[in-house]
Each structure stands twice: as C-alpha cells, then as structure tokens.
Image (spheres, helix red, strand yellow):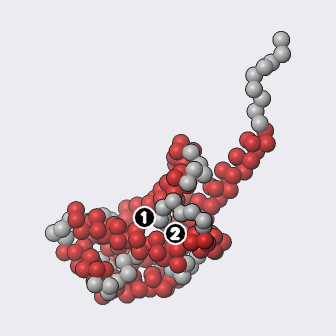
C-alpha cells in the first residue's frame, strides 16, 4: 500500500528556518545595541536619582545621543508612560513626583532609560535588578511587536524570547564600565532600518 501521508514541504521548512534564524540575529543585535547605548544611562540615572540637575543633564545627553528619530520618539513615549504609571501608583514618592513635574514643565524630555533608572532607584530597586528589568523589557517589547504584526506566532515568540534572554547577563557584564560619554551603537544597520518606520504604508501601533 502506498504511503498517502502528506509529504513535508521542504522548501517551506528551509525558508521558515532561515527566517527564524534571521529574526533571532536581529534580536541579538537589538539587545547588543541596547546594552551599548542605553544601559549607561540607566546606570547613571539610577545612581543620581535624587539629583534633579544631574538627571536633567543625563536626559538631555540621551536626547542628543538618540539621533534615530524613531527610536528617540519611542523612548520618550515609553518614558512618559512609565513615569505616569509610577506617579499614580506612588503619589507620595517625592523623587517620582519631582521628575514628573520636570517632564510636564518641558525641562526634561523624559527618555525611557533615564526614567527607568531613576524611578527604580526611588522605589528601592537595586541597580542590577533595574538594569536586568530594562534589558528584558527591550527584548519583550520587540518580540511582542513581531507577534502583533503576525511575523511570528505566540508560542514561537515565547520560545525565542526564552532563548535570547540568556545573553542579557553577558551584555550587562561587557558594558558594566561604559559611561554615558562613551555610548554607541554596535550594529548600525538595525538602527538604519528602524529609521524607515515612518515610510511604512500602514502602522498598526506605535513602538
């Protein structure tokens, strides 16, 4: 009797494997860029959380460092979102309220890395935990965006996220002595590609 079971489409399997590998490479590059560009800002804002003048300086430096207008805009939106949430949940925290007032008064752009570091410190979260949380949020945000766009499935996204999270400690370790004066992009192609976001015919959501 002939085997009538469906034969696998080898071309599709090969193509899917290639796409998955390419996507994971993109995520690795994204995590590396976050480590070399954003982590120093998180670290220094964490250590200076109660010095509003220093936070203002760091925020303006972050604004100048994010030359990619799409990344700059997303950083400000995410920073404002975190600050709004923190100010409502912790209305009696003087540091959080001071930063909120500075941002609302346009004295600070309110970038995500600055807000994240300062708010975590104000809430008593240690530096290593704050840095780890920031890096994991970068990974989670990119994977969630890919799922929303239908580029990967939900379970596939979870599996990829679980694998790639293991590089976060290494990225943090290699960038542990990097200061905000030395921030840079390790993989500029990813940054260049992000710049074309506004030319997309349809944008399903802001990121």
Which residue is situated farthest in the front direction here? 201
Distance (Cα) linking label 2 and label 1: 9 Å
Q: Residues within 10 Å of mark 2 (few under 14, many from 20)?
A: many
- Name the residue nearer the viewer: 77 or 97: 77
Q: Residues within 10 Å of mark 1 (few under 14, many from 20)?
A: many
Residue drawn at (65%, 59%) of the image = 25
Image: 63 above or below 146: below
- Assess whether mark 1 and mark 2 are in contact (beta carbons under 8 angstroms): yes
Q: How many marks?
A: 2
- Name the residue nearer the viewer: 120 or 67: 67
Q: Which numbered dot is residue 55?
A: none
Residue drawn at (45%, 83%) of the image = 63
| Mark 2 secondary-structure assignment | helix
Which residue is situated farthest in the left direction here? 92
For label 1, the residue is: 134
Image: 102 above or below 134: below
Residue drawn at (51%, 73%) of the image = 71
| Mark 1 secondary-structure assignment | helix
> Percent x, y for residue 107?
32, 86
Residue drawn at (41%, 86%) of the image = 60
For label 2, the residue is: 34
> Percent x, y for residue 173?
50, 66
First in residue order: circle 2 vs circle 1: 2
Task: Give the quarter of the image for residue 106.
Answer: bottom left
């Amino acid at each position: 009797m002939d085997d009538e079971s469906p034969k696998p489409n080898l071309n599709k399997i090969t193509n899917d494997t290639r796409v998955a590998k390419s996507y994971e490479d993109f995520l690795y590059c994204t995590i590396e860029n976050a480590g070399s560009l954003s982590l120093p800002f998180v670290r220094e804002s964490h250590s200076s959380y109660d010095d509003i003048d220093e936070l203002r300086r760091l925020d303006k430096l972050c604004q100048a460092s994010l030359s990619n207008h799409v990344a700059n805009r997303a950083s400000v939106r995410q920073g404002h979102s975190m600050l709004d949430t923190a100010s409502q949940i912790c209305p009696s925290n003087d540091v959080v309220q001071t930063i909120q007032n500075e941002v609302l008064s346009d004295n600070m752009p309110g970038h995500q890395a600055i807000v994240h570091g300062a708010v975590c410190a104000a809430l008593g979260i240690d530096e290593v935990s704050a840095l780890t949380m920031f890096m994991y949020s970068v990974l989670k945000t990119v994977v969630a965006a890919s799922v929303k766009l239908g580029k990967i499935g939900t379970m596939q996204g979870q599996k990829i996220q679980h694998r790639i999270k293991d590089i976060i400690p290494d990225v943090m370790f290699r960038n542990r002595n990097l200061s905000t004066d030395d921030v840079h992009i390790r993989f500029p192609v990813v940054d260049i590609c992000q710049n074309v976001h506004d030319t997309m015919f349809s944008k399903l959501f802001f990121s």
